[in-house]
Amino acid sequence: MKKITIYDVAREAGVSLATVSRVINNSPVVREKTKQKVLAVIEKLDFKPNEVARGLATSKTTTIAILFPQSLFANVKDMIGGIGDTGRHLEYNINMFTTDDLGDENTIKSVVERVVKSRVDGVILFNNERIDKTLKALEKYHLPTVVIGKKIDDEKIGSVSIDVKSAAKEIVSSYLEKGKKDILYVHPQQNLVNNDEIMEGINEAYQAAGLEFNAENSVYCSTEYENNYEQFVEYFKTKSHEVILCGYDKDGVAIVNALDDMNIKVPEQTEVVAMFNSSYSIIARPTLTSLNVPVYDMGALAVRLLTKFLNNEEVESNAIIVKNLLIKRNSTK
Amino acid sequence: MKKITIYDVAREAGVSLATVSRVINNSPVVREKTKQKVLAVIEKLDFKPNEVARGLATSKTTTIAILFPQSLFANVKDMIGGIGDTGRHLEYNINMFTTDDLGDENTIKSVVERVVKSRVDGVILFNNERIDKTLKALEKYHLPTVVIGKKIDDEKIGSVSIDVKSAAKEIVSSYLEKGKKDILYVHPQQNLVNNDEIMEGINEAYQAAGLEFNAENSVYCSTEYENNYEQFVEYFKTKSHEVILCGYDKDGVAIVNALDDMNIKVPEQTEVVAMFNSSYSIIARPTLTSLNVPVYDMGALAVRLLTKFLNNEEVESNAIIVKNLLIKRNSTK
DNA sequence: TTGAAAGCGCTAACAA
DNA sequence: TTGTTAGCGCTTTCAA
């Protein structure tokens, strides 16, 4: 089957290819009658303009890349809904680039290389441990960039993030006020909610109360539920806390399940506050009090911001902070 | 910043652009010394070949599209790991096309249109209620196609699926043999495990035992945990079953949680068997006996099969059936 | 309002 | 082993 090109349409419609080009690009100059004639031929021949050729001619691909390490996918997925919808509505294609998790610098270099070769118009990154290196590797190609999950202070780079520092500070402060000072923080493996900022918030809350956060009250966990569950069953054999704050609600499920097995009552003996408020929070027994993060919106906003960069539209701020909200459920009093 | 092109490299290296082209395409004919000289210049100028131009020249984009309705994302995500990794290793880009969930035929037409315009080399579809319409809309463009989640009997279309019919038949038969005849089947909203095939398997198992499956013992559920949970709490007020089989383990969690609230003991009074064996199965209390589906592999195999089509490599079969395995946990005796 | 023609950055005969 | 040249299918001046 021969592919229909703009020439075929031009010949069939008895006009020049420039006119066909104008029609498919909605140019206002073409006479209505000509336009209808051309459109009829396009319909008849089922002509689909070749975006590759257009891309070469215009130096634009109307494609944006999303870029993340494979291991982050479980968290990134929540944003993809918003990215997909918004991309579609604004008529951008979405190109997914993932990096291996072996994760030496080489993979960053190679994925950046693939992104550059593909000539996408812009890129969306997700915060992770190697975000700075990735930004650095991308820098010289002057690709419009938006980062999700971390506030970036650079007028050339956009970002969509949550003020987890304030959120963490508020949560911790409210417990300190109630006299609950033994708070454990469980670091998530992923970094879409920025770990460092959470730690800052916790520290500030303690300082504001004239106390100091005990570094031992901060533990790390893995991305695997099973590992975490076992880790916490072991942990609770010897330790207990009044309050546990965790960065990702899937980890929170491991925590409440482990607490249950150790016969520590939630929320009576230990209160658990999670973040992210995904479906894991409502599946858990008891259901988890959880910081809601508007994941869909973050994806949508990132695409919107990026396309504003691409169209040189004015932006109010290139560091968007989205609202979060603590949703109380049964894992806290 | 001016973009470096193949001309710049050619001039700087003192060769023709054809030679540069040969070098970047690893042509064996170019003399080693020339090759090194060119590579040095490429490195020096940080030249990244424009894939758009190459795509236009070769009529190939080395890009494959993945195509699914937004609502299916929660299920598709499990396959994307394998797709991303395999695509990267085989040097294909992955373009993600989603359809709106409003879902009239128009959205199928428009997404197919976007796929065709983008000139991807091939497409991977995920089984859903409108898969047949989508395949039909795609047909005339002769795009190499692989479907995940449903066996397709068409020599032009590849597929990667699970034999859920046999799996369901086996599970149900084993309960019937034990004298447990009151089995409820909960239809998942998603169709990656093919609902129709599961029903066939169930019916065959009953027939083989000289019985008939009661159509009332088949209920539907939604994609939302909360809806399902409420639906089953209500359901179990008046009904109970010896065994519940459900198509997706997230729904299984809603079921065991609802059973727990209604004081129906699992597995003593009711046994629950789920499918998909995602992390929801191990998070549930009790943990769910679940049919493991090799989701990562399905994604990987789909890409591999598709690239074989693209390279005219020989394929053993274009309808790949992957193995499944029932993993016993605490929701069954 | 339309057409002619150059150009986007490559690949792939074909010739040398 | 290398170079010349004609496309690939569009967009976009410029001229008419």
Image: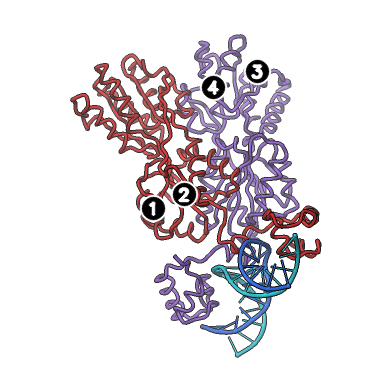
Chain colours: A red, B purple, C cyan, D blue
Residue holding disc 4: B226
| C-beta proximity under 8 Å, tags 2 and 1 | yes
Q: Seen in the image, is B276 located left or right of residue A29?
A: left
Distance between the alpha carbons at the discs numbered 1 and 4: 39 Å
Both on one chain, marks 3 and 2?
no
Q: Residue at point 51% right, 17% down?
A: B266
Q: Mark 4 — on which chain does it sit?
A: B
Residue holding disc 3: B181
Q: Residue at point 47% right, 35% down?
A: A295
Which mark lies nearer to you, 3 or 4? Answer: 4
Residue holding disc 2: A67
Specify the amino acid type for callout 1.
Answer: Thr
Residue holding disc 1: A134
Distance between the alpha carbons at the discs numbered 3 and 2: 51 Å
Exactly how many numbered labels are in the figure? 4
Q: Seen in the image, is B277 located left or right of residue B165?
A: left
Q: Residues within 10 Å of mark 1 (few under 14, many from 20)?
A: many
Which mark lies nearer to you, 1 or 4? Answer: 1
The quadrant of the rendering that contains the N terminus of chain A is bottom right
Both on one chain, marks 2 and 1?
yes
Closer to the camera in the image, D15 or B219: D15
Q: Residue furthest top?
A: B238
Q: Residues within 10 Å of mark 3 (few under 14, many from 20)?
A: some
